[in-house]
Image (cartoon, rainbow, N blue to C red):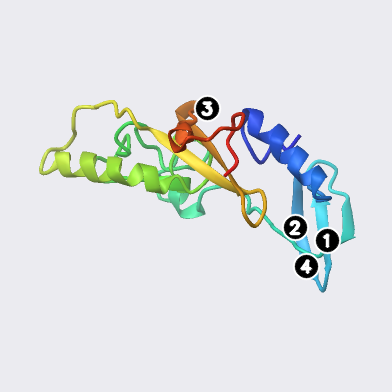
């Protein structure tokens, strides 16, 4: 199961796909060095280092916010820009907005900025010269992440805030079992 890469039922399917293709997933590891067809990882828990060969290497960067957010007093306890989840407006500084992976939004950090951009535009334009706006609940608080299953298929992981499944791709008439692979 690839639980650190994906939510809920997606992790099992991704694990099965990796196994089927003979891929080795090295989870909870920190990349130390990349050499010609070799990499050195460090286990984040044991600090033990090991070397392994690779043909294709896909690295996910650490999921953490930029240091300047916390350094400037804009971050929450985890260092993410502390914004209201429905408006993307900072909770302390009315003229500060944040979206995407640097924000405190309760979702996976998967380039969700595309779904959040219309919310930012709408709520920031409503603010105008006011110091704050009435919080309005948006019905499409949503994010997704594509996982490439092959050179012809993509699986789209879809979820709303608080990492709840929200599989809207059914509108594409997918006939397979959820989650859909296109």
- Compute the Cα span from label 2 to label 1: 6 Å
In contact (CB < 8 Å): disc 3 and disc 4: no
Q: Earlier in the sequence, mark 3 or mark 2?
A: 2
Quarter of the picture holding the N terminus = top right
Q: Gap in Å between the C-alphas at discs 1 and 3?
A: 35 Å
Q: Residue furthest bottom?
A: 36
Give the number of the mark in front: 3 or 4.
Answer: 3
Image height of 140 relative to 129, above or below: above
Residue at screen point 22% across, 39% down = 123
Instruction: Mark 4 or mark 1: name the one nearer the start of the chain.
Output: 4
Q: Are marks 2 and 4 in contact (CB under 8 Å)?
A: yes
Residue 114: percent from left, percent from top:
39, 48
Quick check: marks 2 and 1 in contact, CB under 8 Å? yes
| Disc 3 versus disc 2: nearer the observer | 3
Query: Disc 4, disc 1: CB below 8 Å?
Result: yes
Q: Residue at x 75, y 39 (%)?
A: 15
Viewer-closest of 16 and 73: 16
Q: Which SS class for mark 2?
A: strand
Indicate which disc residue 34 carries: 4
The residue that label 2 is drawn on is: 31
Q: Which residue is labeled 3 in the image? A: 165
Judging by the rendered image, the residue that carries numbered circle 1 is 40
Label 4, label 1: how far apart the Cα atoms are: 6 Å
Q: Nearer the viewer, residue 148 or 105?
A: 148
Badge 3 local density, few (<14 within 10 Å), some, or many (20+)? some
């Amino acid at each position: 199961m690839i639980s650190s890469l994906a939510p809920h039922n997606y992790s099992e399917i991704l694990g099965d796909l990796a196994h089927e293709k003979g891929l080795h997933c090295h989870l909870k590891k920190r990349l130390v060095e990349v050499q010609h067809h070799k990499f050195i990882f460090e286990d984040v828990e044991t600090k033990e280092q090991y070397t392994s060969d690779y043909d294709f290497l896909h690295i996910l960067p650490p999921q953490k916010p930029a240091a300047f957010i916390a350094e400037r007093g804009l971050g929450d306890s985890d260092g993410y820009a502390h914004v209201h989840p429905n408006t993307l407006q900072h909770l302390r500084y009315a003229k500060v907005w944040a979206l995407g992976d640097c924000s405190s939004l309760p979702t996976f950090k998967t380039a969700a900025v595309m779904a959040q951009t219309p919310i930012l535009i709408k709520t920031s334009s409503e603010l105008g010269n006011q110091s704050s706006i009435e919080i309005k609940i948006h019905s499409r608080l949503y994010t997704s992440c594509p996982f490439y299953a092959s050179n012809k298929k993509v699986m789209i992981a879809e979820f709303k805030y608080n990492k709840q499944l929200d599989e809207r791709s059914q509108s594409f008439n997918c006939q397979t079992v959820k989650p859909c692979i296109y």
